[in-house]
Image (tube, grey):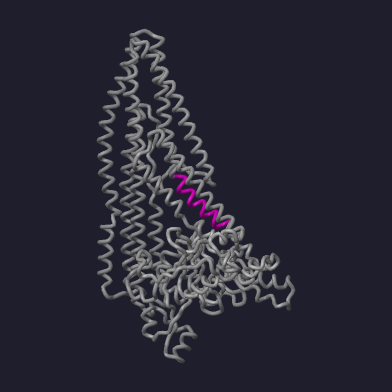
Amino acid sequence: MSTKNTSNTAIEQKHAHSSLSTKITEYSEWRETLITTINEYIDWLGQTDSLNATQELRLYDIKEIIKKDQLVMAFLAEFSRGKTETINALFFPDFNQRLLPSSPGRTTMCPTEIFWDAAEEPCIRLLPIETRKTDSTLTYLKTTPDIWHKIRLDITSPDAMQETLRTLIQKREVDLETAKSLGFWNEDDPSMRRLLAEKGTVEIPVWRHALINYPHPLLKNGLVVIDTPGLNTMGAEPELTLNIIPNAQAVLFLAATDTGITKSDMKIWTEYVQKSATHKLVILNKIDILWDGLETEDEVNALIEKQIQNTAHELDVDARNIFAISAQKALVAKIRKDAALLKRSNIGSLEDALANQLIESKHEVLGRSVVTECSNMIRSSRKIALMRVNQNKSQLTELKEIQNKNREASKDILANVVAERKRYESSVLTFNQGNEKIKRLSEKLLRHLSLGYLNTTLEQTKQDMGDSWTTVNLNKSMRKLTKLAINLAEEVKVEATTIKKHTDDLYQLFYSKHGFEKTQAINLNIDGFIQDIQSLEKITRDFCTDPINILTEKHFLIRRFYLGLVTQIQALFEQAQVNCTIWLNVVIGELKTQINVHKKALDKRAETLMESDNNADNLIKNLEATENEFAKLMQQSNQLDAILLKLMRCAKFNLAPPSFQ
């Protein structure tokens, strides 16, 4: 490919349409449809004067969640398994040569995230390895751009791109003490021991972490690819275990067809994949090694199938989730447009699995959370719309009765409205008292999840650790934090149950006395918070019981693990507090809106009846106005039904009964 035609536009045009890329594109389009539908709902709220500030902010947040949604795929393997080549073949064959550097031996030396952020120019940002000596987490360092070394990507030149990306694999030699202080010495690595014996040095990467911002169509549609280093580097970055890998929608674990599952492969599988990843696929790469021409195609296929079955047994996974491919031949085939070679590489079966299983699963997760919350909002609006229709209908009936009956009858109708107004005022007094009680309980509930209280506890556990950064103390501190979090969650549940009961009583009051629709407040569900905390506890327990960590007691690594753990716990508490705040706004908000609508309707009915009483001209005018209003309200109600139907079509699943997650 010439340097002239490799522009941003060319990247778009040359994008290969595999089943995976097609599904990712469709997923992006689905998200756009979802945002459009939410915008239609926002417009409806604005046109009907129904939009309040809290709801508007929440709908904006939901749209931002959809816009920023990412499909994260993490690739894990020991070195020389063809991991980077697989990424090139799956996602970047349109580059017409290797986008990411891939060669025999240790290639990927630092974790690399590949994505697209339109707010920044195409570039690669590199974090110096020396930052490992600080207590700063990767999460924090990503917010401090000055620490990173930034290199602009010239997307018009493949040669320049390749040269720039080769910085990912830069290495340097250091003495043994420096290597140990940075977490790179492995006594069991023969190549490290050999280099140390020959030169008295150890080879380490120049960079700790890399971020590649590249305007590729799949990346623009939300795909994020994470290329991780081998076992030695993985163990020195606890955030990979605590955050990056568990949050990936798919983890692809690579082994080689010729070697099968080695000891180091098994360690990566058990420590980082088996129990951490929700969706995981196993790739047996390099099947082309078997294409030596000495066996028939059937014999080669039999050998591959035998290796798949052996791998399934060793890893205890379903053989249907193991894919034997040749990433190198797949990349060559895609570049040369060689359909026969592409088919033989078998990468299509892997692409189909990623497309059909993982993207659909991600589709459902986002759809279920967003569509459920938005549909609850729209259903609440439908109740209000129906209330307005019914109240307008009642007013229309009253005006027609006045038109057809005598003056005494109109006085009776007006007296009924006045009596209803008195009952309403009495109920509002009860509501205000109940609302104040709910407000006090809400403040108490949110205090349980306040970061101020949590940070005090975290600081205490850090002091308890003192200078003794051992796995025993780490495990002890985590158990303490887990117990605290679960106890607080239970207290939140109790407070939430009390709040719901008070709210249900108020709903019942307005149902029995004023004919409101029979409704119960939605439940608060914080099971996800508890599960996430328990998951962190398990990751910590596994880290603390790893024989290597117990025997060596790498204090710098334990300290870094603890700091990463704290960041994750703080994030979970912060999100739990946000979720509880949203629930508290929703739980009583619907009734408040209904009460306001009911009050306005009572005022309007009383005013209209008094105007129409014994005045034929006013009566005719008000009848006409009420009929027009009725037609307008029916039209608004039908528009809302259409929006809800469109939202339901966006959800490729059956919605559960309304609840709050």
Image-quadrant location for residue 545: bottom left
Q: Residue at x 52, y 45 (%)?
A: 650
Q: Nearer the viewer, residue 126 or 273?
A: 126
The reply to whether residue 193 is visible in this rendering is: yes
- Quadrant of the image for the N terminus? bottom right
Q: Nearer the viewer, residue 648 or 506?
A: 648
Total labels drawn: 0
The reply to whether residue 278 is visible in this rendering is: no
Image-quadrant location for residue 121: bottom left
Tell me which secondary structure the magenta stretch mostly adopts. Answer: helix
Farthest top residue? Answer: 406
- Which segment did they paint magenta? 356-372
Q: Position of residue 250 (x, y in %)?
A: 51, 62
Q: Position of residue 220 (x, y in %)?
A: 50, 58
Q: Position of residue 528 (x, y in %)?
A: 41, 54
Q: Nearer the viewer, residue 315 or 236?
A: 236
Q: Residue at x 51, y 42 (%)?
A: 648
Q: Nearer the viewer, residue 504 or 449?
A: 449
Image-quadrant location for residue 51: top left
> Does 370 appear in magenta?
yes
> Does 222 appear in magenta?
no
Farthest front residue? Answer: 4
Q: Position of residue 352 (x, y in %)?
A: 61, 59
> Is residue 152 rendered to the left or right of residue 359?
left
Farthest bottom residue? Answer: 198
